[in-house]
Amino acid sequence: MQVKEILRVKGSRLLGVEPSERATQAVRTMAEQNLGSLVVIELGRMVGMLTFHEIMEALAARGGALGEIQVGEIMERDPVSTGPDMEVNDLRRTMLESGARYLPVLQDDKLLGVISFRDVAKAVLEAQDLENKMLKGYMKESPA
């Protein structure tokens, strides 16, 4: 299974935020939309990622308040990314080794979507369920 197959099932709904936007507004958007990350876009290009991890670090460093801080001050610049043709096992390894819970999917500098660790786990589980059903069907039909 490849990343593009996960994106196809998940959909490519993307919400972005500009680096100049206040972090408090980004947090509000993430909470309202039930998202763990936002793509940071400037002049039509991805320049970073904002995840709950960066928000928690900013809150810890500032005594629990974001104040007037802008997204660009706390976002992750140059996040680890993947391409649509990467195999899921390689993707899992990349996510585990980098500690990234969200990976932007890029092709020729075009943002196709964002894959979360949850998306990967769900896709792998569904693939295993399908394989199990097929094997059970094969075992029922084969002579003993």
Image: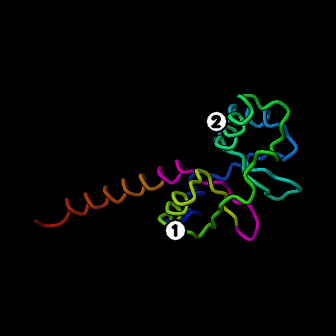
The mark total stands at 2
Q: Nearer the viewer, residue 26 or 44?
A: 26
| Residue appearing at x 26%, y 59% in the figure | 137
Residue 24 part of the magenta-drawn span: no
Q: Do the residues under discs 1 and 2 have CB atoms within 8 angstroms?
A: no
Q: Position of residue 130 (x, y in %)?
A: 37, 56
> What residue span does the magenta drawing correspond to?
107-122
Q: Position of residue 139 (x, y in %)?
A: 20, 62
Give the farthest residue toward the left. 144
* Label 2 SS: loop
Q: Nearer the viewer, residue 11 or 63?
A: 63
Amino acid type at image mark 1: Glu
Q: Nearer the viewer, residue 27 or 57?
A: 57
Sequence-wise first label, 1 or 2: 2
Which residue, given by chain and number where applicable, does mark 1 sit on?
87
Which residue, given by chain and number where applicable, does mark 2 sit on?
34
| Residue appearing at x 64%, y 43% in the figure | 53
Residue 139 lies left or right of residue 103; in this view the side is left
Residue 131 lies left or right of residue 47; in this view the side is left
Q: Nearer the viewer, residue 24 or 58?
A: 58
Tell me if mark 2 has few (under 14), some (14-19) or many (20+) residues whose alpha carbon lies within 10 angstroms of its own: few
Q: Quadrant of the C terminus?
A: bottom left
Amino acid type at image mark 2: Asn
Cα distance between the residues tagged 1 and 2: 27 Å
Q: Position of residue 99 (x, y in %)?
A: 56, 54
Q: Position of residue 124 (x, y in %)?
A: 44, 56
